Image (tube, helix red, strand yellow):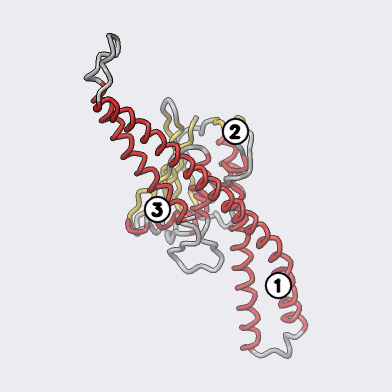
């Protein structure tokens, strides 16, 4: 995929060079009075016609190459999605079996196992849980942009309230929503995951006694613009791009797949918007994102 994308970039650069050449041709054509009598054929005009003809053929050739590259990318993306489905479904059963077997061993042989044996079994269970989280994350990431969803009116007020109510261990969490969230065009499936990932991250990566989360929005003619801010651990500027890359984690947490923010970014792209953040270590972070109306 990287090589195919690189080739597309090279072809785009080549087309830009051609466009500049054609602009030069247009400048030359302006010397001719096209509304009046055409000039007699000369060696210069013939060369100009040949040049335009050659450039046209070159553009057609490049477009054909780009079409092949696009088809190759589509095929490889489909193969990756199919592979993700296969991996996620094929691994579910053995992971569940390992989890159940270790639980039975701990329960049935607790009097026989020593401390080292129990610790080893617990480590196996933790790694199984990590693999299960990763598998679910891969499946979610591979399908979040592919699944066709009909857009309809969604009340973000009710959606966000549902997300907040379903959060566990929120006794020390203070939510602030200055004004009623709007009703927008979208789909509940993606929007729920978008807000849930951002809100859960704001809580998870927060070492304050009182976790403070503020959610707000503005709008313009074309976009809804939202923000979710917190008083958490914060993120150093050099990691701003890294956190949106799949499987990149800033903290070693086996319960995290490292894919939540990459899913968020993919959802935003589906809605033709953008996402970025402002953050200061030990002070907090604010994620800004837009959704096209």
Residue at 49%, 58% in the rendered image: 246
Count numbered badges in the picture. Answer: 3
Q: Is residue 273 left or right of residue 143?
A: left
Which one is in front, 228 or 263?
263
Estimate the spatial distance between the alpha carbons at disc 1 and disc 2, rounded to whole Å.
38 Å
- Residue 65 screen position, x and y as percent: 47, 45
Disc on the earlier residue, 2 or 3: 2
Which one is in front, 280 or 57?
57
Tag 3 residue: 231
SS under mark 1: helix
Residue at 74%, 81% in the rendered image: 105
Estimate the spatial distance between the alpha carbons at disc 2 and disc 3, rounded to whole Å.
28 Å
Q: Is residue 26 left or right of residue 63?
A: left
Is residue 112 positioned above or below 218 on the image? below
Disc on the earlier residue, 1 or 3: 1
Is residue 12 positioned above or below 29 on the image? below
Residue at 39%, 33% in the rendered image: 56
Residue 154, label in figure: 2
Residue 141, label in figure: none
- Residue 135 screen position, x and y as percent: 62, 62
Tag 1 residue: 99
Circle 1 Cα neighbour tier, 10 Å, few/some/many (<14 / 14–19 / ≥20): some
Q: On the image, which quarter does residue 55 sit in?
A: top left
- Residue 50 screen position, x and y as percent: 33, 31
């Amino acid at each position: 995929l990287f090589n195919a994308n690189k080739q597309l970039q090279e072809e785009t650069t080549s087309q830009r060079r051609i466009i500049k050449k054609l602009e030069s041709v247009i400048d030359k054509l302006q010397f001719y009075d096209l509304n009046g009598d055409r000039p007699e054929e000369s060696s210069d005009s013939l060369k100009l016609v040949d040049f335009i003809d050659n450039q046209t053929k070159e553009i057609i050739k490049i477009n054909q190459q780009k079409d092949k590259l696009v088809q190759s990318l589509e095929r490889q993306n489909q193969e990756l999605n199919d592979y993700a489905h296969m991996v996620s479904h094929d691994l579910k059963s053995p992971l569940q079996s390992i989890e159940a077997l270790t639980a039975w061993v701990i329960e049935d042989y607790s009097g026989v196992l020593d401390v080292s044996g129990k610790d080893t079994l617990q480590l196996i269970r933790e790694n199984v849980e990590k693999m299960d989280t990763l598998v679910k994350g891969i499946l979610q990431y591979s399908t979040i942009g592919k699944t066709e969803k009909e857009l309809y009116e969604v009340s973000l007020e009710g959606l966000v309230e549902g997300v907040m109510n379903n959060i566990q261990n929120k006794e020390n969490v203070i939510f602030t929503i200055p004004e009623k969230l709007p009703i927008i065009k979208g789909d509940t499936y993606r929007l729920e995951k978008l807000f849930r990932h951002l809100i859960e991250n704001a809580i998870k990566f927060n070492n304050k006694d009182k976790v403070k989360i503020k959610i707000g929005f503005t709008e313009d003619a074309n976009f809804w613009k939202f923000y979710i801010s917190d008083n958490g651990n914060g993120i150093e500027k050099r990691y701003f791009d890294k956190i949106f890359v799949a499987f990149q984690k800033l903290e070693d947490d086996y319960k995290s797949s490292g894919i939540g923010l990459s899913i968020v970014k993919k959802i935003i792209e589906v809605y033709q918007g953008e996402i970025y953040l402002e953050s200061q270590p030990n002070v907090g972070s604010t994620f800004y994102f837009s959704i096209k109306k």
